[in-house]
Amino acid sequence: MKYAMTWTMAAALLVGGVGCHSYEDERPDVGSLDSRDKGLQSKEVIDSSEQMAASILSSPALNERPDQMLIVVGNIKDKTANSGARTDLDIFLRRTKVIIQQKGRGRLTLITNKADLQEMQSKELDNPAPDQFGQGGNNGQPLPTRRQPDYMLNGQITELNNRGTSYYYFDFKIFGLKGKDSGIEVWNGGYEVKVEK
């Protein structure tokens, strides 16, 4: 009787354990491709952002500057066949930005996007901006201004759309916003991948 109960409990544990999923089953590695998915996947986000951040941080043109570069991160222009889709391709730049911030060792300073900063300031700061057109009764103090960026990091994704595959080319660049480098691309990096449809 004692052994029968032990075997019954062991069998129940085995049967119960068969249906369990591990973390890896529920959350596959973000650096791998998933055969169930088509098009761009997380692997491309990881690979391209690692490659671009390494290129930026090792660029002699950027590292030999006497002053710290003040960079604002822009957006990705979507020039793909699915440009009307709801995919936010800015994820490529956001991940690159995080890596630069973590590994940059102060060589680059990232400046918050102007529109994002103004939105956060209007929500969180007590002193609203004065009415610059004199139409209201607001006599509040002006919101603090941000440091002005010297450069912008942005990118573009284009696609060569074929019957069975799509070739994607990512073009990332840092260009000057003001001063002697205004309009000049001081760094440019590319990433390419071909995917099945």
Image: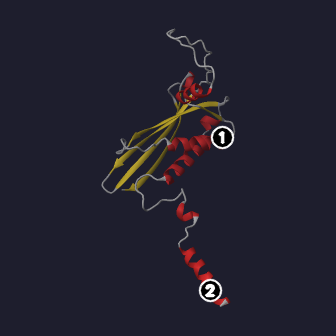
Q: Which residue is mark 1?
A: 104
Horizontal side, residue 86 vs residue 152: left or right: left
The colour scheme used here is secondary structure
Which residue is depicted at the point 53% across and 72% down?
Answer: 19
Label 2: few (<14), some or many (≥20) within 10 Å? few
* Eye-nearest disc, 1 or 2: 2
Q: Nearer the viewer, residue 176 or 28?
A: 28
Horizontal side, residue 79 vs residue 3: left or right: left
Q: CA distance from mark 1 to mark 2?
A: 59 Å
Q: Residue furthest top?
A: 134
Q: Position of residue 68 (x, y in %)?
A: 66, 31
Quadrant housing the C terminus: bottom left
Q: Residue furthest right?
A: 105
Q: Residue furthest front?
A: 1
Q: Which residue is mark 2?
A: 7
Q: Secondary structure at mark 2?
A: helix
| Marker disc for residue 46 | none
Q: Quadrant of residue 112?
A: top right
Q: Position of residue 113 (x, y in %)?
A: 55, 30
Q: Position of residue 102 (x, y in %)?
A: 65, 43
Label 1: few (<14), some or many (≥20) within 10 Å? some
Amino acid type of the residue that numbered disc 2 sits on in the rendered structure:
Trp
Location of residue 55 with respect to 11 vertically, above or below: above
Q: Nearer the viewer, residue 176 or 2?
A: 2
Q: Quadrant of residue 24?
A: bottom right
